[in-house]
Image (cartoon, grey):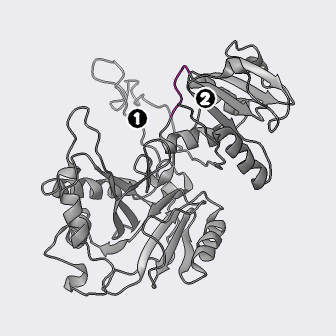
Amino acid sequence: MVASLLSFVMVYLLASSKFSRKGGGMKGVSSDGRKGRKRYSSDGSKRKTSQKKAPVEFQQDVSPLPTLTRPGDPKLYYFTCRHTYEDTLIDEINRYTNRKVSAFSPYPGLVRVEDEDDILPHHYDPVYALQSIPDCVVVSGESISLIAKSIFNTIFDEKDSVDGNDSENDTRNFSELQKRLRSAPRGSLSIHSIVPGMCKGQKNPAMQNRSQKVAESLLTKIKKIFPAARRPQDGEIPSERWVLQIMLNSPEIAVASLTRCERIGPGYSYWPNIHHTLGLANVDIVEKMPSSAYRKLMEAIECMRVRPSESAIAFDLGACPGGWTTVMRRLGCSVVAVDRSKVDPVLMKDEMVNFVKGDAFAFEPNVEDICDERWMVSDVIAYPDRCTFLIDTWCK
């Protein structure tokens, strides 16, 4: 079976801070010359010190905070994107809806959409969105247990509804969703705990621990009723996937979304993304790479959940300096690297890399390069019509 892949994804990353400690005098020694009690035990051996906790990163306010959900409110969606791409994503959404929705960014990397006329499809997948949080409800609670209870009563408990009232116009009527989730197989429900700071790539964002505890408390309640929240049997792969996303906007206000995911692409990829919270894949490599562009290909492979076998041949069109060729080699397959300029010297010495000097758009594989599994990857800069022509050619 021939597999072909072309990905144009953009990746940008962020990060961190440090602590200092005050102190004076001779540390660990008392006035009479004895070793200090805190750092040393009675026998004179040094005590083991606990590791410092990572500092909690600054929490920028979500503005404005969402109002609590009421019957008849517009449908509420959130989308995540790379920081600085908020306006681009908003423009994309406005073009799709002919500006009939209210779209704005309440926080870096986050776009909120209020859809009063029910225009957006449930599985709407904008090009510039990393993750979708559709059909949200907004609840509040003074404690972790009360927030979890509010989410459970709103989404999962058939006896309760938003604000205690039923309405034919209430867009958050979850009874049909509950019925479908009850019949979903074990292990099909994933729960993502989210805080806004994660959208900026913060490693230890404010409220993260609180959000995780809300999710844990909620899971305890859900799995008593819904098998989908329980662990699957050994080796069992669920035939469908669900995701419950919980995002704290403040210590007492939470946004929650329950969605049956839609399978997309050639692999085991779903939308909304069940494998990566907020759609953020970990694509950093410690070793030195020929270029940072490798992250784009790694992100595409991670999100699509499809990988080449070691017997595959990958054709990297426009390969120089060799970031994408390196990724394919790390995955185990041999690579034909095509470019007018040579790739990184390390790759030029690699016996599993065949460098071909030439034009990426004019290149045609040799007969000896034909095998059961072929991949084509390309990071060339070209107009869309040339790119689509290249894809069509290789897919044939």
Local secondary structure at mark 2: strand
Q: Quadrant of residue 32?
A: top left
The residue at the point 57 percent across, 32 percent down is 2
Q: Could you tell me residue 149's position as x and y percent?
A: 20, 67
The residue tagged 1 is 51
The residue lying toward the viewer, choosing from 126 and 30, is: 126
Front-most of residues 389 and 30: 389
Q: Amino acid at mark 1?
A: Gln
Residue 150 tag number: none
Judged left or right of residue 204, residue 327 is: right
| Image-quadrant location for residue 251 | bottom left
Secondary structure beneath dot 1 equals loop
Provide residue 196's location: percent of width, then percent of height: 47, 61
222 and 96: which one is in front?
A: 96
**What kind of residue is marked 2?**
Arg
The quarter of the picture where the C terminus appears is top right
Residue found 61% across the figure and 81% down from its top? 98
- For marks 1 and 2, give the one nearer the viewer: 2
Q: Residue at x 60, y 82 (%)?
A: 99
Q: Which residue is mark 2?
A: 374
Segment tinted magenta in the rendering = 307-311
Horizontal and vertical percent for residue 309?
A: 51, 25
